[in-house]
Image: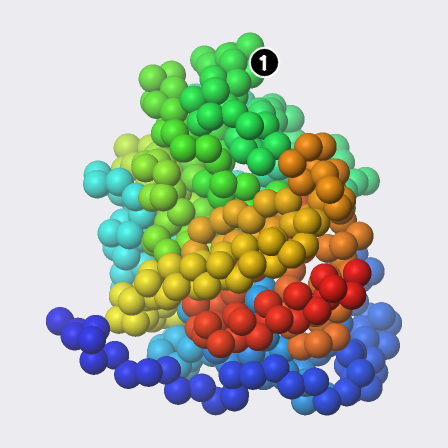
Amino acid sequence: MTDTSLAPAPVYTVPQERRIVTAIPGPKSMELQERRREVVSAGVSSTLPVYIEKANGAILVDVDGNQFIDLGAGIGVTTIGHTESSVVEAAAAQVGEFIHTLFTITPYEEYVRVAELLATHTPGDFPKRSVLINSGAEAVENGVKIARKYTGRRAVAVLEHAYHGRTNLTMAMNFKAAPYATGFGPLAGDVYHAPSSYPYHDGLTGAEAAARTIAYLEKVVGATDLACLVAEPIQGEGGFMVPADGYLPALQEWCTANGVVMIADEIQSGMARTGRFYASEHFGWVPDLVLTAKGIAGGLPLAAVTGRAEIMDAAQPGGLGGTFGGNPVACAAAIAVFESIERNDLLAEGERIGTTLVSGLEELKSRYDIIGDIRGRGAMIAIELVEAGTGDTTKVPNAAAVSAIAAYAAQHGVLVLTAGTYGNVLRFLPSLALSDELIRDALSVIDEAMAAL
Ligand SMILES: *Cc1c(COP(=O)(O)O)cnc(C)c1O
């Protein structure tokens, strides 16, 4: 047994501080941006075109020597910190052993170990099975496939403001058409967008919001045709909406009673991000299937569908898989991530970050009335910005302020992401390596940015 009290303090290879030494983007980044325009599709955009040379802990270093406090973690991927030493070591060691065999040809232990860890850490105390794939969207696709096979039904329901990916099926499951689906149709059919719980705007209790969602599913889809309901416990791209208490368990109860598979898309909210292993736990929700991706392998591509054995085993042999799914290097990294979360008590770090962030943001809210709402859990916190004076009434989205603050922050060495159906949410999705000192420093920049509006 590891004695967690003896866990050594992390050693960083990059000083954990912001440092701006050129204009942003700097000259070397500008040169690379020129090269990129010649060869990279215009369909691939970058939030901040500074080219990265090194990353460690909570800091990104660009090719011009600028250092940024990273409040995005590659959209919640480097959750345990950039280049965390145990992940680097585990991946490097695996590269020297073997890099690929294809689990569906000749299997290996690392895949089985990741499935064991997923069975242990996902919500619910029942026999579970997993399939490993490469990306979040692929996890969503597989979750839907499995639910359809198990139920023999066709329809898929999602919630308003959802984001599930960029493949053909998942494009149809997103709430926002632009930019994810515009012009890319025809989209997959039989996907229904049910009303969600968005307490800041709808003012409904969990029970009221659930009744509204269920009424929609019963009237518009019909329970007997519904294979699955897919929900993010805390919505990511939509703007970190935290559903009202009781909402998710009420939906699960209805799904169970009606033979519908309920799937938690924990791709952004899972893997210790919110102070729990999975955000579903905050709401007392035990889903049938859980989707994991982003943070699972410290930055290497890996994703999983995990859930009730009888549902997962409904898929016929050969029906699930893919060439790179459960790559051994990604699996070795994932095992190191799970171990690091336990050894370094990273669930507590998530709580710490949430507490420090929220208290700093509350202080800003007392001075800036464009902050309408502060919400989230752990290292998944957002502020929704509204037009001044509308925070308690009409809550008019203020996307311009969000863009201006993110741009100001970038110029001053803080990378902060935006989100929200109306583009008016600033999201804080840092790695768990972010110290309280860096949080306060980053918030002082956000403060300056708000003052400069
Ligand atoms: C990022 C994300 C996805 C898609 O994951 P990819 O790895 O980008 O395909 C799906 N669902 C949620 C909630 C996400 O945040």
> What amino acid does circle 1 point to?
Val
Q: Nearer the viewer, residue 74 or 330?
A: 74
x and y percentages locating residue 15 in the rendered image: 52, 88
Residue that appears at 65% across and 36% down: 392
Q: Residue furthest top?
A: 219
x and y percentages locating residue 283 in the rendered image: 37, 38
x and y percentages locating residue 364 in the rendered image: 61, 59
Residue that appears at 51% across and 83% down: 16
Decide: few, some or many residues near mark 1? Use Cα within 10 Å; few <14, some 14-19, many ≥20: few
Residue that appears at 75% across and 69% down: 408
What is the quadrant of the C terminus in the image?
Answer: bottom right
Q: Is residue 58 visible?
A: no
Q: Is residue 306 left or right of residue 133?
A: left
Up-down relation of residue 91 to residue 144 (above or below): below
Q: Residue furthest front?
A: 367
Up-down relation of residue 307 to residue 38 (above or below): above
Q: Residue furthest left?
A: 1
Figure quadrant of residue 109: bottom left
Residue that appears at 38% across and 29% down: 246
Q: Which residue is mark 1?
A: 220
Q: Is residue 259 left or right of residue 239?
A: left
